Amino acid sequence: MPNEQMKITNAPILTLDSDIEIETAQLKAELTWHEIQNAYRTRKILTGMLGGIEKTETGSLITIVYYKDFRIVIPVTEMMINLVQDADHDYGEISLRQNKVLNNMLGCEIDFIVKGLDSKTRSIVASRKDAMLKKRQIFYLDKDASDMPKIYEDRVVQARVIAVAEKVVRAEIFGVETSILARGLSFDWMGDARERFHVGEHILVRILDVQAEDPDHISVKADVKSVEGNTSKENMKKCKVQGKYAGTVEDIHKGTVFVRLSIGVNAIAHSCYDNRTVGKKDNVSFVVTHIDEERNVAVGIITRIIKQNI
């Protein structure tokens, strides 16, 4: 009897929302399956995470997208990866390039429209291409009451990062992919975009140019830096000729060293007084010899390497 009393006393308090936790994994799966069936009937755009790349028995590439706990198959032909394929590019090369593009996209968020499903095996086939074309129509071609599309030049919009390399970020802006080069990502010197941007994240971009003829022919140019603004101009007022400042080497190109000073100023050096070889991400001491107001850059000399990035 005392043991039974102990069990009752130590039991957690039963609250009114406890029944929510009793919802089983099976019930959740049923609800999601019902949602996918509805999306199939209505051609609703769903969003999932690109989680894998596989080869079928026939050797063709398929991508695996996860929507909640469901595995969705999208053939590579429905991924809207537009690579040149002509007499100079045989399928083997195209296949390798497609694989490379998809590898860089792993972990990104993509839209899709369900094209077919099997209730017995609960297998689902979808198309990213159909979802992108539908979004293109809605956001670039359809006009509102003031005869304007939703996306136009100078508008700030949210974009998805779908791939990142050292000097470029690939973004998807409502069904249209565009590459933003390092110079369009920040007013600050940026040695490696992968340190600031990550596949799967959402970023704000400003639309610089839109060319939209029809859903198949739409191109967009955008940047990130004009949304963030240029703090370097204001910070340059703190910078004095003959002033000595700490900084970090962001990049080295053809003998020119690009340094981001700790006071928030872009700087370049053509020479280094330290007998060691300066490298990326080294902390350095920098003396300003000249201020290039036109380019908003401090020019000077690296007097020594404070700490090497080894």
Image (tube, grey):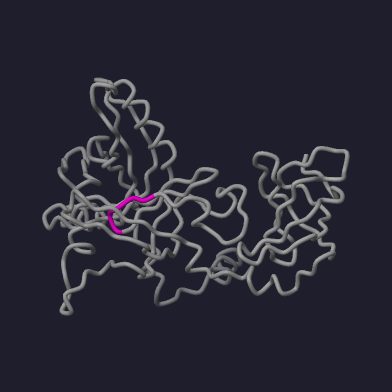
Q: In this rendering, would 26 be left or right of 160? A: left
Queried whether the magenta region covers residue 78, the answer comes back as no
Instruction: Locate the N terminus by quadrant.
Output: bottom right
Viewer-proximal residue, 124 or 109?
Answer: 109
Q: In this rendering, would 227 be left or right of 273? A: left
Q: In this rendering, would 157 be left or right of 188? A: left
Magenta-colored span: 174-178
Type of secondary structure dominating the magenta stretch: strand
Residue 141 picture quarter: bottom left
Q: Residue at x 17, y 39 (%)?
A: 120
Q: Is residue 97 above or below residue 167?
A: above
Q: Residue at x 75, y 73 (%)?
A: 238
**What is the x, y in percent for residue 310?**
78, 39
**What is the x, y in percent for residue 52?**
38, 37
Q: Residue at x 21, y 41 (%)?
A: 125
**What is the x, y in percent for residue 242?**
85, 64
Residue 239 picture quarter: bottom right
Viewer-proximal residue, 246 or 290?
Answer: 290
**What is the x, y in percent for residue 37?**
16, 53
Q: Is residue 38 above or below residue 87?
A: below
